Amino acid sequence: AERAQRPAVQPAPPFTSPSPRRFRHDNGQEVVHVERHDHPHHAISHAFPLGAGDDPRGKEGLAALTARLWSQGTEDLTKDAFEAQQDALGANLWAWSNTRRIGLQGRALKANLPQTLDLAADLLLRPGLRKDDLERVRADLRADLLQERGNTRDVASRLLRPTLFGAAHPWGRLTTEATLKRVQPLDIRRLHTALKPQGATLYVVGDTTPEELTALLTPRLAGWTGASPAPRTPPPPAGRQHTLLLIDVPKAPQSQVILASTGPARQSDDYPAHLLMTAILGGSFSSRVNMNLREDKGWTYGARAGFTYIDRGGWFEASSSVRSDVTADAAREFLKEIERMTQAPPTTAELERERGGALLRLPARFATQSATLDTLEDLDAFHLPPDTWDTFQQSLLRLDADAITQAAQQTLRPADLTLIVAGDAKTLREPLQRLVTERLGGLTRLVELTPDGTPPP
C-alpha cells in the first residue's frame, strides 16, 4: 500500500552560503578565502583578467595555447618530473583559460599544503614554457580543430558566437589552424609576463585560517609585484540576424540544429525568472522541447534550451542533434515551443517541478571545496554581490506563472532568431530553403559556410 502513493517532496531547508574573508596581500593581490575545516583538502585558484577575448587579431588561440603550455612544468621540472611531484604530494595543478580570464588552479591536501604551494609558486612565477612542449600542445589543439569538423554539434557550436556577436567581436573571433600557427614562443612569454598580482584574485577554500594562509603565501610570492592589464569593455554585438546558416558536414547522418539570439546579462534582477523559464522550456528531461522532440516525435536523444552568460552579456540557445530527414521539421517544432513559451503560462506542475529542483540543487554549489571556489569565482566574474545565493531561495519562491510568462516575453524573440544547422548540405539545402521561403521565425536568407566560417569554395 505504501507504494501506491508517491512520497511528497519536502520543502528545501533554509540556505546560507559561506561568507568569504576578503583581504589584500602585500603585493596588492586580492585574496578571497573560505575556511572549511570539515575536510583536509584545499582548492586554490589564481585568476587574471585576460582571456581569449584579448588575443591579438590574427593570433586567436594565444590564451588557450598559453594555458596548455603553462601546465607542462617549470623551469627546473619537465612535464614528467612535474607530474611526478604532484603525484608524490597528492596534489593537482593546472592552468585554464576562457573568454575573459586565464589562471592557475589546484587541489592540495592539508598535510602537504606547504610543499604544494612551493610547487604552485614555481609554476606561477617560473613556468617552463618550452618550445618542444609548445609544438606538442599546438599539434593537440590543431587535432581538436580537425576533429570538430567531423562532428555536427561541434561545428554548429563553433560558429554560434561569430554569428551572434560578429566575427570581429572579442567573443566571436575564431581560432583556426592558421591563427594557431602564428602564435610564437615570444607571444606566450609576453602574455605570461603581463600576469601580475594587482588586478588578479587568489581564491582559497580549505582547512586554513586567514593568518595561516598569509604566513604561507608571503615568502612564496615575495618579489612578485606589478599590475595586470585592466579588463576591456567589449563592444555591442554586431552579429547577423534573420539568417539561416547551413554548415556542410558531408554525409553526416544527423544534423545539429541551433536557434539562438543575444540574451540578457547574468546581472539582471530577473535572473531567477529567466532560470525557471528556460528550465521549463528546455532545461530538464521533462522540459517542453525534450518531451516534444524526443518523447513525442522520437527524432532525438535529447533537446535543450537555456541562456549562456559571458561577463555582462550572453545568448539564448535551443539545440538538438536530430535525424537529417527531420531537420527542417525540428526547427519548426523548436520555434513552436519558443512561441508557446511566450504565450502559454506554465502549469502548476511545471513551475513547482523546476522551482523545487532549483531549490534542492542550491546547496550543491557549495558542497565541496572545489564547488565553493568555482561559485565564488563566478560571482566575481559576473560582478555579483556576495549575498547573491542567500537571497536566491526567496526570489524563486516569489515567482508565479505570470512572472515566468513575462520573462519569456522579455527575453525570447521568436521573430529575431538565427537558425544554425550543421549537416549534409546536399540533403538539407532544399528543405531548409523552404524555411526561408516561409519566413519561419523571420528568416530572410540562407547562407552556406565552411566550419571555419568562410564561404565554401
Image: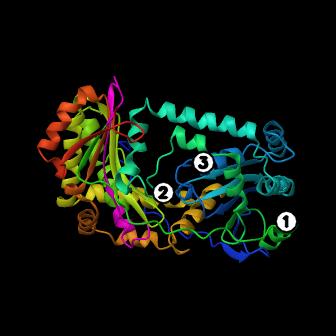
Residue named by callout 1: 216
- Closer to the camera in the image, 32 or 72: 72
- Please tell me whether mark 1 sits on a helix, a strand or a loop: helix
- Closer to the camera in the image, 321 or 451: 451
- Label 2 CA crowd tier, 10 Å (few <14, some 14–19, many 20+): few
Q: Is residue 437 above or below residue 143?
A: below
Residue named by callout 3: 64
Closest to the camera, between mark 3 and mark 1, is 3
So how many labels did they put on this image? 3
Residue named by callout 2: 361
Asked if the magenta segment contains residue 261, the reply would be yes
Q: Earlier in the sequence, mark 2 or mark 1?
A: 1
- What segment is highlighted magenta in the picture? 247-274
Q: Is residue 270 above or below residue 99?
A: below
- Closer to the camera in the image, 415 or 189: 189
- Label 3 CA crowd tier, 10 Å (few <14, some 14–19, many 20+): many
Amino acid carrying mark 1 in the image: Leu
Examine the rendering and report whether any part of residue 226 can be seen: yes
Give how far apart the Cα atoms at labels 3 and 1 are: 30 Å
